[in-house]
Amino acid sequence: MAIFIPAITHAQTRGTVDVVKDSRIDTLAARRSTIKVTGTSAASAVYSTSGNGYRVQIYNGSSRKEAYDAQARFVNDHQGTRTYISYAEPDYKIRVGDFRTRIEAEKLVQELKGKFTGLFIIPGKINPPKITTGDD
């Protein structure tokens, strides 16, 4: 019995925990509530991470040169909109935008009619909108 009593009292002592972290984490946590999101409409101005949404396909074909030309034409007119190029043999696909709703994608399709042929709205994973802060 004399052997177990010191072990029990030693096991019940409390220790301390030291948290080591970068001070910028507290700064980011405090600023999170003040972050403003810029989007194509007020409905898309929601703080979130990557999720499901829509992109508009502006080109689908086997010519690499035509694919990059279509991408360049789009970027000249819509500099703030992201473009994505993919290749699945034998076709190149150019998709543009990160729209949360199909209605937002439809607006872009209506705007691009006549400039691009074969416009399609493609559902899938999208990237979050670019985040801007008021301190810039």
Image (tube, rainbow, N blue to C red):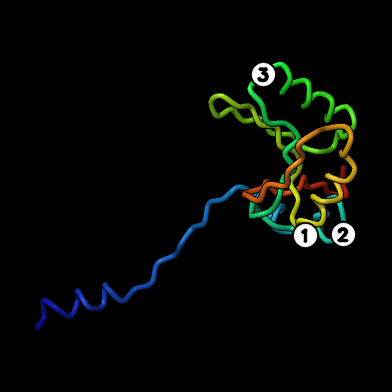
**Cα distance, mark 1 to mark 3?**
36 Å
Looking at the picture, tell me which residue is in the foreground, 84 or 15. 84
Where is the C terminus found, in terms of image quarters?
top right
The picture places residue 115, in percent across and down from the top left corner, at 87, 32
Task: Tell me which residue sits at (82%, 51%) in the image.
Answer: 106
Q: Secondary structure at mark 3?
A: helix
Q: Which mark is residue 46?
A: 1
Q: Earlier in the sequence, mark 2 or mark 3?
A: 2
The residue beneath circle 2 is 42
Say which residue appears at 72% left-offset and 45% top-offset. Answer: 55
The one nearer the camera, 30 or 48, is 48
What label does residue 78 carry, if any?
none
Q: Identify residue type, mark 1.
A: Val
In the picture, the disc for residue 64 is 3
- Which residue is depicted at the point 87% across and 55% down? 41
* Disc 1 + disc 2, Cβ < 8 Å: no
Q: Earlier in the sequence, mark 1 or mark 3?
A: 1
